[in-house]
Amino acid sequence: VPLVESGGGLVQAGGSLRLSCAASERGFVNYAMAWFRRAPGKEREFVAATTWNGGTTDYADSVKGRFIISRDYAKNTVSLQMNSLKPEDTAVYYCAAEAIVRARRPSIVPSNYSYWGQGTQVTVSS
């Protein structure tokens, strides 16, 4: 499995969670990384993404100002800090890697990502 997520769980509205995604190979440091989510009965949607060097990030409007994506190159991980969580943030969160070496901007389109984790459940209670 190229990517493994962790950190999901149950939290009350207004709380915080930190998701982490560990990449299995060192080569992932050259790829844009992103988080997507899928809520019950809904399509998979973009949440946040970052370029290979962390220089450019992008967020869905629904999470701007609340979520932060970051990379740890020593650990070969990408994290998603989620603050001020809302019940509508409830979903399975997936980590993904875009297999384009050192792309200038991260894509927000799921089909552009070649590697995916198994997902981690985030549940926000009201």
Image (cartoon, grey):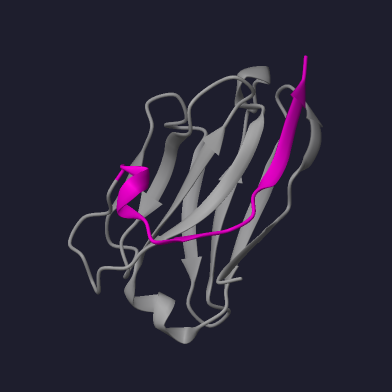
Q: Name the residue located 47 percent from the left edge and 30 percent from the top edge.
A: 63
Q: Is residue 103 left or right of residue 41?
A: left
**Residue 16 location (% of width, % of height):** 70, 38
Q: Quadrant of the N terminus?
A: bottom right
Tell me the quarter of the picture where residue 45 sits. Answer: top left
Q: Is residue 118 left or right of residue 46?
A: right
**Image position of 30 with respect to 46: above or below:** below
The residue at the far left in this view is 104
Q: Is residue 70 left or right of residue 18?
A: left
Residue toward you, 105 or 17? 105
**Residue 35 location (% of width, % of height):** 48, 48
Whether 12 is among the magenta residues is no
Tell me the quarter of the picture where residue 82 sits. Answer: top right
Q: Name the residue located 64 percent from the left edge and 23 percent from the top edge.
A: 40
Q: Name the residue located 39 percent from the left edge and 61 percent from the top edge.
A: 114
**Image position of 88 with respect to 28: above or below:** above
Q: Quadrant of the C terminus?
A: top right
Residue toward you, 29 or 119? 119
Whether 119 is among the magenta residues is yes
**Image position of 12 with respect to 20: above or below:** above
Magenta residues, start to end: 108-126
